[in-house]
Amino acid sequence: MRTSIRVSGWVLLALPMLGACQLDWVKVDEEVLVAASVNRGPNRRPDGLDGPEAYFAPLDELTLLIDTPDGKHLFGESTIPGLFTPSRLSLQDGRCRVNPETNYRIYWGPIRGTWAHIAEAEFMGLRRNLWDDPDPLYLTAAWMARSYPSEMTFPRKLIEDGVTFSARKAARRLATGLPWGVTADLAVAAIDRNWTNWIRPGQINVAGEVPVPSVFGHGTGMFGTAVRWTATIESRDAEEETGLVDCDLGRVIYN
C-alpha cells in the first residue's frame, strides 16, 4: 500500500559549496510519499480495509521518500512498535483517580520493536506559590528499555532527568506525589530504534545527546515512529464523590 500525506518538518541537507560540503537545516513542506510494506502488522483492521488515507497499524513497516523541488531525494525506513497498553491502569472516559502525596508504578509487558520510552505530562491546578505561569507545568522524561517488561514511576520519573530552572520548585513538590486537586494529562510512548538513536545519551566523556540519523540521501535527519497511550490522572481523596474510578496502580514507597 502506498499513501500520500502532507507533512511539515526539518531535515539536514548536505549542500555542496566551493568543493566542500556545507550542512544546513532546510524546512520541508512538500508532498511526501509514505509507503507501508505489504507485511502489515497483526493489528490491521479486521475488515481488511486500510481505513483513512494515512492509517497505519502497529508493526507496519514504513518507507519515507522525500523529493524536493530542486531535485534532491531523501529516504528512510521505520517499523512502528507494537501495541502499548499498561497492565493494570483502570480508566473511565480516559480519566482516573489517585491518592494525593503518593507515587505509583505503571507497568506494561513486552512491546515488539520498542527500543526506548518517552513520557510527558502537563500538570494543572498547582498552587500559585509552586507555579505562577498561566500555562500548565510541562515535564518530560526519556529512558532506554527495549521489549522486555518495563515500568515508570509516576510522577517521580518525570523529574529524575532534570527540569528547567523555572520548574524546579514545583518539581521538588511533585517528588512525593501529586498534591491534592492537581490534574495531570499523561502520555507515554514506546519508540522505535530510529527515534531512540536520535536521542541516545553520550558515552564516557561525551555530554548530552549523540544523534544517529535515519534519513539518508541528499541530507540527513530522523524518521522515527511510536505508539502511545494517554490518560488524565486526578489527585483526590478516596472519600470524595469525584465520579472517577481508581487508577488501580501499584503504590511506591520512598524513604
Image (tube, rainbow, N blue to C red):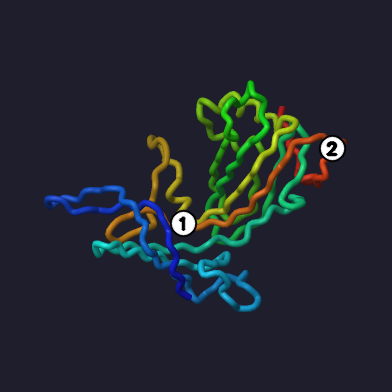
Q: Could you say which disc has been placed on residue 224 in the image? A: 1
Residue 142 x/y as whole percent: 54, 43
Quadrant containing the C terminus is top right
Q: What amino acid type is highlighted by mark number 2?
A: Ala
Residue under label 2, please give it. Answer: 238
Q: Tell me residue 120's x, y (percent).
A: 58, 43
**Residue shown at 42% from the left, 41% from the top:** 209
* Residue lying farthest to the front in this orientation: 134
Q: Residue at x 38, y 64 (%)?
A: 31
The local crowd at label 2, few if under 14, some if 14 to 19, many if 20 or more residues have their Cα within 10 Å, is: some
Q: Which residue is at the far left?
A: 18
Q: Furthest-bottom residue in view?
A: 48
Q: Can you give x and y, in whole percent of width and height, for residue 81 in the image?
A: 55, 60
Viewer-proximal residue among 117 and 74: 74
Kindly state the secondary structure of the residue where label 2 is placed.
Answer: loop
Q: CA distance from mark 1 to mark 2?
A: 41 Å
Q: Answer above or below: position of 235 versus 200.
A: above
Name the amino acid, label 1: Gly
